[in-house]
Image: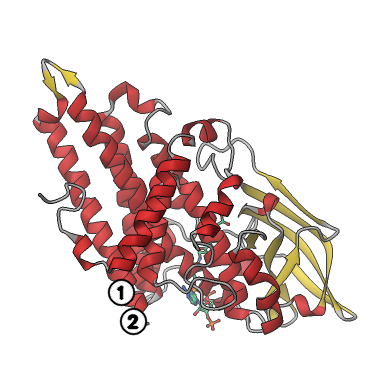
Amino acid sequence: MQDPLDLLDLDADLTANERSLRSDVRALVDEHVRPNIAEWYESAHFPRELVPELARLGLLGMHLDGYGCAGRGAVEYGLAALELEAGDSGLRTFLSVQGSLAMGAIRMFGSEDQRNRWLPEMARGEVIGCFGLTEPDAGSDPSGMSTYARRDGGDWVISGRKRWIGLASIADVAVIWAKTDDGIRGFIVPTTAPGFAATPIAGKLSMRASVQCDIALDDVRVPGDSILPEARGLGAPFRCLNEARYGIAWGVMGAARDSLTTALRYSSDRRQFGRAIAGFQLTQAKLVDMSLELEKGTMLALRLGRLKESGRLTPEQISIGKLNNTREAIRICRTARTILGGNGISSEYSPLRHASNLESVRTYEGTDEVHTLIIGRRLTGIDAFR
Ligand code: TGC
């Protein structure tokens, strides 16, 4: 009989390698994440102890070639994101920041020396990276950044502020984007450099099992060869964001699947008015709506993955996936919560935690509004940003 969580039989469109990697990541989440995530979330603990496990499966920078990276396909990367986010968005965020943003920037724009110096250790999880683009006053419009890097003899001296930077306080190295006399450039900055300080942001109601930080850069001096030679202009960080946004289009379907699974199980077990609540028409309508959007969203992610593997994926198509799937995943998680009634607000059940996490996911890597206007610009030819 068809798996109720895959009514369209999308499995049949996956290769044996893709299914095998998915099983490995799912097993990791079942063994290490599910038993602990509620406690980590409540105590705002990022499970750094899982990094060696993620590295052992070759997940860090998994879509990159060479330099110790696994060279996996785009769909494999997407499936890994989905399975990790079925555990918690914070874990998938780790995959995105380490692999797509920090390692991706060094792989795409770094010199041979920089790639050899950083990527193998990052793939092994021995070095953690972060990606400093957003600032307190430059979020959706990173062109308004005020962080500045000036030449001083052979060195660069960087000053400014970054905000909402994932992993920064546990990172060993930061890719920092800054204005220079030559436009926006990227720099590899060891977090031990004098003048560099990362402070975790407290009081988060979302992504509690994850770390987001303020970064202060006060006259941080780095050698001249710290600049990423091939990154010129904002197009460079946007190319890193394309990779991370693509992973999100997949990942959020994991949060949605976990919520639907929870709601299906709960509604079969929970009895009211003398029978399982899954037998009520209103509950079935909710379950069906969730299932439709889960199937459509996963199919969309798979389509993007195949486009990416054939080198045809465009930024606008990524925006379709990021916008649609995050929006629908939040709806699915919230609907699942309603099926759980009062129990749905307890950390014993995942849907509200997922929905709360997805408030961050719909905001970072381009808000719903930014992706709407990227697609709107493609439809109309009119730029509505400015
Ligand atoms: P504009 O300033 O005119 O363009 C600058 C240059 O960038 C190029 N470009 C892209 N290139 C590749 N891929 C993309 N997706 C690109 N989008 C733009 C563009 O062609 C131009 O190139 P050039 O050679 O002409 O200079 O910008 P725009 O009008 O194209 O874009 C405006 C807008 C609003 C779409 C863009 O600014 C945008 O995407 N804003 C959202 C910013 C964003 O996503 N921030 C996320 C920050 S990082 C983050 O959230 C990390 S979360 C993980 C963590 O650390 O925890």
For the residues labelled 2 and 1, say whether their Cβ atoms are less than 8 Å apart.
yes
Mark 2 Cα within 10 Å, few/some/many (few <14, many 20+)?
Answer: few
Amino acid carrying label 1: it is: Arg
Residue occupying the point 26% across, 66% down: 14
Q: Position of residue 5 (x, y in %)?
A: 21, 48
Q: Determine whether, in the image, residue 144 is placed left or right of residue 325.
A: right
| Residue farthest toward the top in the current orientation of the protein | 274
Asked which quadrant contains residue 345, the reply is: top left
Q: Position of residue 268 (x, y in %)?
A: 18, 29
**Residue 198 seen by the camera:** yes
**Residue 358 seen by the camera:** no
Q: Which mark is residue 310?
A: 2
Q: Determine whether, in the image, residue 214 is placed left or right of residue 328.
A: right
Report the front residue among 231 and 69.
69
Asked which quadrant contains residue 153, the reply is: bottom right
Whole-angstrom CA distance, mark 2 to mark 1, is 6 Å
Q: Position of residue 3 (x, y in %)?
A: 17, 49
With respect to residue 24, does 175 lie above or below? below
Q: Determine whether, in the image, residue 264 is placed left or right of residue 158.
A: left
Q: Secondary structure at mark 1?
A: helix
Report the front residue among 357 and 2.
2
Residue under pointer 1? 306
